[in-house]
Image: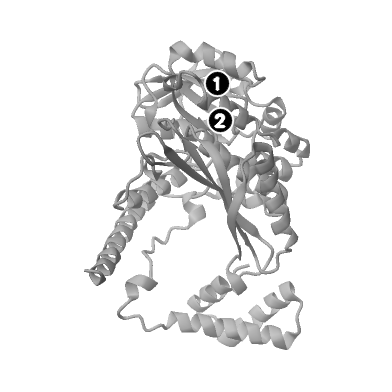
Amino acid sequence: MDIEEFIKTSLKNKKNEDELIDNLKDIIIHYKQIPEDKAELLSKTVVDEIITTQNLNHENIEHLLTYPHTNIKMGEFGVGSRGEGDFYVHSKIAEIIKNTKTNALVDPIAQDDGGVIKVDDTHYITTAIDGIHSRLGDYPFLAGFHTARATLRDVCVMGATPVALISDIHLADDGDIGKILDFTAGICAVSELTNVPLVAGSTLRIGGDMVLGDRLTGAVGAVGISDHKPTARSEACLGDVILMTEGCGGGTITTTSIYNDYTDVIEQTMNIQFIKAAELLNNYPKSDVIHAMTDITNGGINGDTNEINKTTHLGIKLYKQKILDLINPHVLGMLEDLAIDPLGVSIDSVMIIADKNEADNIMKMLRSENIKVDIIGEITDTGYTCIEDKYGNSEILKPKFRESAYTPIKKIIDQLTDNNFDESAHIIDEKTREAIDKKNFIVDEIRKRYE
């Protein structure tokens, strides 16, 4: 629980200060189990701190201590839920980056799996970072394993060989230190299996003294190197075919299995098959025929294909049955049992966009290493994604507001969600411009000091 936010909200709602201190004291005792007088002292001190920060004399530096308020909440707009709202906010983040005078070969503007810096004519550095799945905090080993696996996969599908992992762990004040150890062990399991060392990291408390409870969050990042052009989404060409490897799921499927009591599915996700596939693909003799790669994670194939459409301004035609046939049968069975759309959830397959004349050879190579793969579609000139079922019926595949609801709480939230996307997007546009203006102003002010 964020006690700092509890106080701010209570003061904003004109709650009586003495009553507020008393209420917070009870909350602290619930978590801390400390004497009442110490809990009351902590409570009063927190309230005093918040009142101090709300009355700061910041006449000359207000721009440093405030931010552009949209009054739109993360959950309301679906940020982090791998759907339309999430993609939109990421495009605004990319807009701020676009207005930053630095050089990158592939940056978040492309909405790709990783970023790429060109070192010289023949060397590239690729970086990626993935956050812990929010519902795996009570299962630290699984959280570490799947986050490490995801970030390595993001580097691999950009055509790079991963060479290092980094970790950022945040555990709330009442969290058991064993969570940090177990999370690290999960990362190191992937590290050992892939021979990619965990070389650095950071360990902090969530919110310092201001967040009670034992919530675990954080991220794992990866660095990769390559000596050829990255296989970014933007390199897809008209007429290319789309291949897909078997999807056994990762953090999302693990979460689905835990919170719906399909725990036998967890074991299906514990693999590093993508590393073997990526090594084969990145060392393919005719490297120029593999134009682009991505992992099917961001809201499922529904979300990923629509992002490719935006990046390339091309279209995609998919074959639904081919996709379903490449989802691990245990995973697909669970999704069908729970009425979860497999096209709208992360299944962790690798999608390969390649020259159609080389497709058979690529598939032969992968299958020789027991990696299931098939052609699931092709690049068209329509500008949108359509999907054809086994009866030949086609429909346009559009990104949903959120990814497929895969836990009981997500299904309820889906029913409660009511938003005006266009109105909210307009406000976010305006506040993005304010953030860019603020950045530009501060950069100019700092530069003046050195002139």
Asked whether the viewer can see residue 166, the reply is yes
| Scheme of colours in the image | one colour
Which residue is labeled 1 in the image? 320
Q: Secondary structure at mark 1?
A: helix
Q: Label 1 is placed on what type of residue?
A: Lys
- Residue 77 place in picture, x, y as percent: 46, 51
Rendered residue at 30%/64% (across/down): 438
Q: Which mark is residue 101?
A: none
- Residue 209 place in picture, x, y as percent: 61, 74
Q: Which mark is residue 343?
A: 2
From mark 1 to mark 2, how far is it between C-alphas?
9 Å
Rendered residue at 54%/80% (across/down): 15
Contact between labelled residues 2 and 1, with CB atoms less than 8 Å apart:
yes
Which comes sooner in the sequence, label 1 or label 2?
1
Rendered residue at 53%/11% (across/down): 360
Q: Is residue 106 left or right of residue 47?
A: left
Which quadrant: the N terminus? bottom right
Q: Label 2 is placed on what type of residue?
A: Leu
- Residue 141 place in picture, x, y as percent: 72, 49
> For mark 1, does the 10 Å Cα neighbourhood hold few (<14), some (14 to 19), or many (20 or more) residues?
some
Rendered residue at 55%/21% (across/down): 320
Frontmost residue, 310 versus 271: 271
